[in-house]
């Protein structure tokens, strides 16, 4: 049985929408953003994806450190309107864990852009709490690093309570 939950965060960056979209849709550059990633290998796109990657993360569970491997696909990069870009990605790891990321990047009137991220995590019930904690921790750090990489910004921390549980993907 799987359990799903969501969390979201927003940040502002002093860059153009296209620059933020280019960085966020290129997982090979995420070693500078994501605190767990140690290696990224781009592979031929699978199942209609725009880009596909094999990613190695280094994680800890108590005193135990281990490396895990998963695939991540950029499913879509869509223009939603004047200057607005949406990036949809899906990371998959065995057994039965997925992380769907829907990111929208908007220009802001005083310069730069706003990045809104919504993450939906699905994992087997026994793994859900650990996977959720790791995903939140990684994306909190990713948001802070993204601001630094893209320029001066404010905000950038995940919002809300723990993810809402449901019986299936949201």
Image: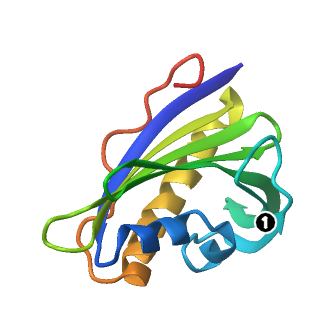
The quadrant of the picture occupied by the N terminus is top right
Task: Looking at this view, name the residue that lies furthest to the left.
Answer: 110
Left or right: 9 as drawn, with respect to 45: left
Q: Quadrant of residue 164?
A: top left
**Which residue corresponds to mark 1?**
56
As drawn, 19 above or below 63: below
Seen at 73% across and 65% down, the residue is 57
**The one of 57 and 102 positioned closer to us in this rendering:** 102
- Residue 53 seen in render: yes
User: Could you classify mark 1 by the number of other residues whose Cα lies within 10 Å: few (under 14), some (14-19), or many (20 or more)?
Assistant: some
Residue 95 pos. (x, y %): 82, 37
Q: How many marks?
A: 1
As drawn, 91 above or below 4: below
Residue 3 pos. (x, y %): 61, 25
Left or right: 92 as drawn, with respect to 131: right
Seen at 62% across and 43% down, the residue is 99
Residue 155 pos. (x, y %): 25, 65
Residue 143 pos. (x, y %): 42, 66
Q: Quadrant of residue 26?
A: bottom right
**The one of 13 and 48 positioned closer to us in this rendering:** 48
Seen at 58% across and 63% down, the residue is 25
- Residue 63 seen in render: no
Left or right: 49 as drawn, with respect to 84: right
């Amino acid at each position: 049985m799987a359990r799903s939950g969501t969390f979201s965060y927003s940040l502002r960056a002093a860059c153009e929408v296209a620059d933020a979209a280019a960085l966020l849709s290129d997982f090979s550059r995420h070693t500078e953003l994501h605190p767990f990633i140690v290696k990224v290998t781009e592979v031929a796109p699978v199942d209609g994806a725009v880009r596909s990657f094999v990613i190695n993360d280094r994680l800890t569970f108590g005193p135990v450190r281990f490396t895990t491997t998963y695939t991540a696909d950029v499913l879509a990069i869509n223009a939603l309107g004047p200057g607005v870009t949406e990036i949809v990605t899906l990371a998959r790891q065995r057994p039965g864990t997925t992380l769907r990321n829907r990111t929208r990047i908007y220009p802001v009137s005083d310069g730069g852009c706003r990045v809104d991220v919504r993450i939906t995590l699905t994992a087997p019930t026994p793994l859900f709490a650990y996977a959720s904690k790791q995903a939140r921790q990684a994306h909190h750090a990713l948001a802070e690093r993204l601001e630094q990489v893209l320029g001066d910004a404010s905000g950038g921390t995940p919002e809300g309570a723990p993810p809402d549980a449901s019986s299936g993907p949201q």
